[in-house]
Amino acid sequence: MSLRIAIDTGGTFTDVIAIDDATGDQFAVKTPSTPDDPSRGLLNGIGEIVGDSDGALSQVLHGTTTATNAVLEHRFEGLGLLVTSGFRHIIEIARQSVPDGYGNSFFWVKPPRLVPLHLVREIEERVTFDGTVLTPLDEQSVVDAVEHLADFGVTRIAVCLLHSYANPAHEERVGEIIAARFPETFVSLSSVVLPEYREYERAMTTLVDVMVKPYCQTYLRRARERIGERAGETPFLIMQSNGGIVSSDTAGEKPVTMLLSGPAGGVLGATHMARLAGYEDILTLDVGGTSTDVSLVRGLAPQLSTHTYVENYPVKTPMLDVVAVGAGGGSLAWIDSYGALKVGPRSAGADPGPICYRRGGAEPTVTDAGVVLGRLPGALIGGGLELDVGAAREAFEALGRRLDLTAEEAAAGVLEIAASNQVQGIRTVTTTRGLDPGDYAMIAFGGAGGLFAADVADFLGIRVAVSPPNPGNLSAFGLHVSDIRRDYVRTLVRRQSAADVGELEGLWAGLERQGREEIAAEGVAPGDISLARSADVRYVGEGHEVPVPVPAGLSGAAAIDRMWSDFHRVHEQTFGFHYEGREEAEVVSLRIQAVGRMHRPDAKPAAPAAGADGPPPMRRVYWRDSGWVECPIHRRDGLARGFAMDGPGIVEEYGSTLVVPASWALRVDDYGNLILEKRT
């Protein structure tokens, strides 16, 4: 047996999906994450699948939160920044805009600096916007600056020189000097990380890259070595934020591309299952142990963003448009100074975890609330994790006394608040952009996705929610349906009236050559490589651009003309208006996305079940409107295709539980998806 294994490391559990190359059979396991050394959790997951058998591993695919956690935990020590002389205050100046508008000016506090001013050093050099060298690089100033940083214990240096996107020669030489004189120092060059204009975003993205580089490189090296000890020379591929995979060596070179590695797999898996279920426009609801990730997919095309924030820090690299909120199964319930019940964003995580896990948790969580209400079983992950229902109830009795509520009322309130927090995330990608969430089907997954699917849908007027097979492991499954993907960008500001077709075409063609070469270096055959062009375009005087895709097959003047004509349509779709014929347009950056089609085994649905023998067992479940009700408890692997039922009821399986309220109906489609449909 030869297995292709995908592993998604989350804050609480490490999820694994293995597919047999020969038969397409799937195997799913969940194992506790190991935050002190995530590579242990990764190997534990492989061991759960392979055991002591002689089964070979044909490939290991991995999505990880290592890069994101380094930022969220503020691991800023040892960071330094090199800039062009006269531009030492890039980080202080930042942008004049204030989050949530100027009404927030009196309350907003700038996030902690990644680099204090005394660790930002200037070097003598200057390049103009068109790449002309105005002041040659003073190499001694580089040595002096790095020695100064080394005296302060700096071990990670970001280099962001003015206009290096137009001419990277000075940055490249700085990198060579540091490598020769200070070989133990980690270095990231902005001309490699983000060859675009806008100095603040370029500097911040480069700082984030070098900040997470030692953690990611160490983790990936350790994981690669342990996989090698277990399975020999097995290809080890890493999910990127843009929804593509690359080799672990490539990922370590530019780890900023791994920031949304895990959630990206979930979006791809949800999109794949939505296509099988017959839905093209979907909202994804990925509820894990620590957070909930939501995204919008239109026409089976995940939305891509080139500018996002990790916490409060701008990161300008292509990422799937995923919004995260601090509401997961491990989110803590607490009472604020005003006496109001709150849920999250703090989480019990994998250690100690919820109270019911019997691992030392002392504060009630969302999972504890589900146990108290009878919505979760007495054991999780196939009976591998016994839950202490009594301890969870004691915690909610104590919480309820502080709020003058019963334990059930307090637990129901916690689930409602958690669902409301998730709703805010979905509204961020829908109503705030002029979209009605009721026009979309929702794909709910993650370990706790089924616990909240109907409640979140009710909040938003969504009438269809889908629970795919192995929903607790869907982010891992998404790795199996991904391709190798790389994004390339170059800034070239040109007005439409002055743009030279040859210049634009030459730049695009150069990026395409680079893409083909680097994708081919990953072992992809030339016939499996595809290239997509796009451009960032705006009206002259605008502060922000819109991405304009160029249809496949167009090049030269045809591609340029199509870019200009489509811009006005895209601008109207984005902002609700356009100025065609009244204002001149200008291109700002050209982009190429190179995709290497991966061979993937057929991920066939599980065979239809014969159906359970006799009526399902019953369990008392608490509902806010009707109190305790005896409800049927179904095993998912006992539901045949075509099975249908009206709520209330519960469907349990390895890794997840689906709650079906009285106002919802359930049916099983041909691919094993559980389709929730609103009845009233």
Image (tube, helix red, strand yellow):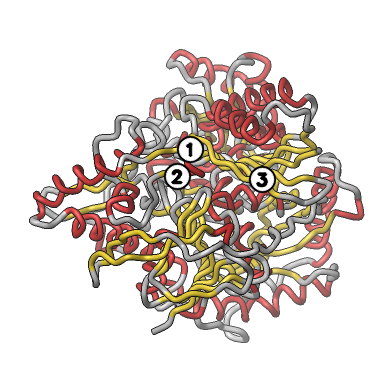
Tell whether 468 sits left or right of 348. Answer: right
In the image, residue 170 lies at what x, y percent?
Answer: 67, 33
- The quarter in which the N terminus is drawn is top right
In the image, residue 512 lies at what x, y percent?
Answer: 82, 54
In the image, residue 251 lies at what x, y percent?
Answer: 67, 37
Element at label 2: strand
Residue topped by disc 1: 384
Please report the residue visible at 61 percent of the width from the left and 84 percent of the height from the top: 580
Question: Residue type at mark 1?
Answer: Gly
Residue topped by disc 3: 27
Tell whether 554 sits left or right of 635. Answer: right
Label 3: few (<14), some (14–19) or many (≥20) C-alpha neighbours in 10 Å: some
**Foreground residue, 110 or 141?**
110
**Foreground residue, 415 or 407?**
407
**First in sequence: mark 1 vs mark 3:** 3
**Foreground residue, 178 or 74?**
74
Would residue 123 be seen by someone viewing this image from the given angle? no
The answer for how far apart the CA atoms under marks 3 and 2 are is 17 Å
Element at label 1: loop
**Foreground residue, 140 or 286?**
286
**First in sequence: mark 3 vs mark 2:** 3
Question: Residue type at mark 2?
Answer: Leu
Question: Residue type at mark 3?
Answer: Phe
In the image, residue 331 lies at what x, y percent?
Answer: 33, 47
Q: Identify the mark at residue 380; answer none if there is no mark.
A: 2
The answer for how far apart the CA atoms under marks 1 and 2 are is 6 Å
Would residue 506 be seen by someone viewing this image from the given angle? yes
Q: Residue furthest front?
A: 614
